[in-house]
Image: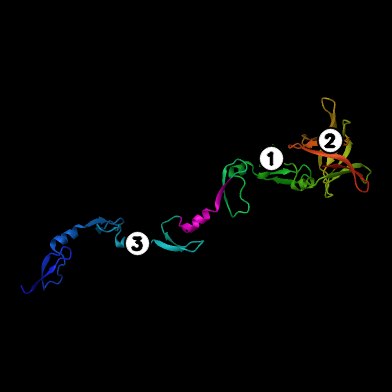
Amino acid sequence: MSNWYSRSCEDCGSEMFIHEDWSNPPTLCKSCKEERRAQWYERSCDDCGSTLRIHRDWDNPPKLCKSCKERRAAKWYERSCEDCGTTLRIHRDWDNPPKLCNSCKERRAAKWYEKDCDSCGRSIRAHRDWDHPPRFCDKCKERYAPVEASCDHCEKSFVIPTGTQVQCKQKGWDLPKRCPDCRELFRHKPFKTFRETTWLGAVVFRTYNSKGQLIGESQDEVGWLGDERRVHRSPTGTKTGITRDKKDWLGNPYRETIGPDGRRKSISREKTTWLGQKYTESTGGSSDTKHRTTDAETWLGRKFRKTE
């Protein structure tokens, strides 16, 4: 027995006899070996199906063998976030690999907000960095797409944008018939109408805005049926309307101006204030804008008609 010695089992402490010639002397008794062996089980690798030995005490038991882990790891690579430069892990099988980290995605998303379409109220996405956020949804843009028109005053072609069409629709107005340049001419009030004479000696009534720009001129004519009328023309010579004297069903006189398209542009009547001052009140346009015209004169004594 001199070649034998005893030692304790590492788990239970029971005595074991060990021979000096054993190259790998046991550290556990047979019962403890079997107990430890019972804590191991086998499962298949999720990718290749090879056998994996798993211990029941492991919190995260592996699902892949080492070779499959390495193969999967080789499909991942790194790139930098476009905004902040932090490292992103990208898989080679992803169809749309991310370009931003989560925090930068959230920061970018926070810059987007929703607003109502000015026409129909439908929700529109807009960005806080845009200098001119959209006012209309795609459907309204399509419905009220910019249209080309010819100016009634100068005959120049101009475009009526979506916003103007929507505004006219909401307020019940007709679409503008004048180009932006002509509308700018008429924007500067009061107007002054002077009685002048052409180089041929004909009498004309020329109207200027408050900046002294010629808006148009009018001239009395007699139609081929003998009717008296006043014909209005723009500075370019385009006929913009004809004014005739008329009476309503009560016999009250008024003047009616008809545009080139045959539609009424305005009507005007002579009126008197409670102080006895005479003036002409004209109403025109789809918005029924009212204007008052009175007699006036310059500081040099030149008489004219002032329209406000």
**Count of numbered badges drawn on the protein:** 3
* 2 or 3: tag closer to the N-terminus: 3
Q: Position of residue 176 (x, y in %)?
A: 73, 42
Residue 111 belongs to magenta span: yes
Disc number at residue 168?
Answer: 1
Q: Quadrant of the N terminus?
A: bottom left
Q: Is residue 59 left or right of residue 129?
A: left
Of the image marks 1 and 2, the number of the one nearer the N terminus: 1
Residue furthest toward the top? 250
Could you say where residue 99 lies in the image, as x and y percent from the top left? 48, 59
Marks 3 and 1, the one that precedes in the sequence: 3
Label 3: element kind: helix
For the C terminus, give its image quadrant.
Answer: top right
| Residue stretch rendered in magenta on the structure | 96-115
Horizontal relation, residue 35 to residue 258: left or right: left
Name the residue type under label 1.
Answer: Cys
